[in-house]
Image (cartoon, rainbow, N blue to C red):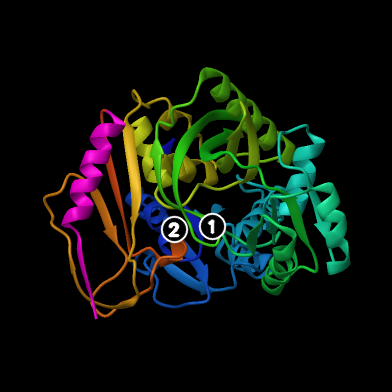
Amino acid sequence: MIDNLRGKRLLLQGASRGNLGFVKTAKQHGVNIIMTGLGGDFPCNPYADKFCKADISDPDAVLKVAQEEKVDGAIICCSDTGLQAVGRCNDVMGLAGITEKAATDCANKLLMKEKLLAAGVQTAKFLKVTSEAELEKVVLEIGFPMIVKATDLQGSRGINIVREKSNLLHAYQDTMSLTKKDYCIIEQFIEGKEFGAQAFVYKGEVLFVLPHGDETIMCKTAVPIGHYMPYEISDELYDDTIKQVTNSIKALGINDCAVNVDLIEKEGKVYIIELTGRVGANCLPELTSNYFGINYYEMILATCLGESPLPIWEKRKDPCATLARMVKSEKSGICEDVVVPDNLDAQIHMFIHNGSEVRAFTNSNDAIGEVIVKGTTMVECETKMAEVLKEIIIKLK
């Protein structure tokens, strides 16, 4: 039960804002937070009971901390960095949550794609590429448009969409300059409607698959700037989404954790782009909480500490429309003033203050804040969002 968590010791990977909502929930339930990372001024720092310096991408270093601190669970939210270390702790110490093998397969896009195709999951065809000499084969077997992907990076890094042969070599060289691997993958670029899903698996059972809409803008590739629930799709597409996500979770052996999924729909079929065994970023945990009328972080917290999430899940309410959007700047500069009225019907989190550096938006790391609203319909949510964003004033110098 969630009431049994007080005094338990939890290893939290990193102190970035992606972990903030989770760590606040953990502290509300009296959990002791053992935080790992390399140090620095991060939003989660005030919530740590103890900080232990360790590179979260180094499973051996993180496991050493976990064993010395005798933790009852390990977690990272909204980021794949550190997920393999969480899996190592779970395997070696017998903790609940994703295994290191599943985390490794999720983190490497080549391994993930191989597992998905072997299980019959609908996903884009691809080739592993290790040299420029192999690009001609790619043109013949994949065709245009195609997408060049680093297998070990997150977000939009190391991803290049290529629509004609003259751009392929440059795209390949750019991707290879960023990856730590000596290869990348090049896959068919499925041009359709992208969306996502949040899911949760406990003791081998997928408790839910919740599709959500993604709002994106085109930078180097499509970059998400917001999400919303519910995502309206036909019954046939919804059923296909459930099938593809469930089969993907089983193919990768993901268990006892939240799952974040990227999908695309084309001509009545749903294709898996990628998935990973942790909760989604950019307000997706908060949107899931709003939609179901529960604290989704509590489900994640209970599970990773060896307790059942079912008592929380069983308290869910009728679905609620909800929308989140990043606050972004069209230009760079230094923040001179931030004005956020406190009488707005929304959750508003600003990441900047006077003196902060502000970058013109090119990816989610450039976001300067986020706004979350809910209502009875998406029209009501859109109206609220427009009103809130109009009232937030950012002055740059």
| 48 and 44: which is toward the camera | 44
Residue 392 percent location from the top left of the image: 19, 59
Q: Residues within 10 Å of mark 2 (few under 14, many from 20)?
A: many
Q: Is residue 95 above or below residue 37?
A: above
Q: Position of residue 252 (x, y in %)?
A: 72, 41
Residue 14 appearing in the image: yes
Secondary structure under tag 1 reads: loop
Question: Which region shows up in magenta?
Answer: 377-397
Res. 243 image quadrant:
top right
Say few, some or many: other residues with alpha carbon within 10 Å of mark 1 (under 14 / 14 to 19 / 20 or more).
Answer: many
Q: Examine the residues drawn in magenta and state their main secondary structure.
A: helix
Q: Amino acid at mark 2?
A: Gly
Question: What mark, if any, has residue 18 been given in the picture?
Answer: 2
Pick out the residue farthest to the top. Answer: 235
- 394 part of magenta stretch: yes
Q: Position of residue 160 (x, y in %)?
A: 64, 60
Specify the quadrant of the image occupied by residue 49: bottom left
| Circle number at residue 79 | 1
**Looking at the picture, which amino acid does disc 1 mark?**
Ser
The C terminus: image quadrant: bottom left
Q: Does the magenta segment cover residue 243?
A: no
Which residue is depicted at the point 73% across and 33% down? 121
Please give the name of the residue rendered at 67% of the width and 72% of the height, measured from the top-left corner. Answer: 178
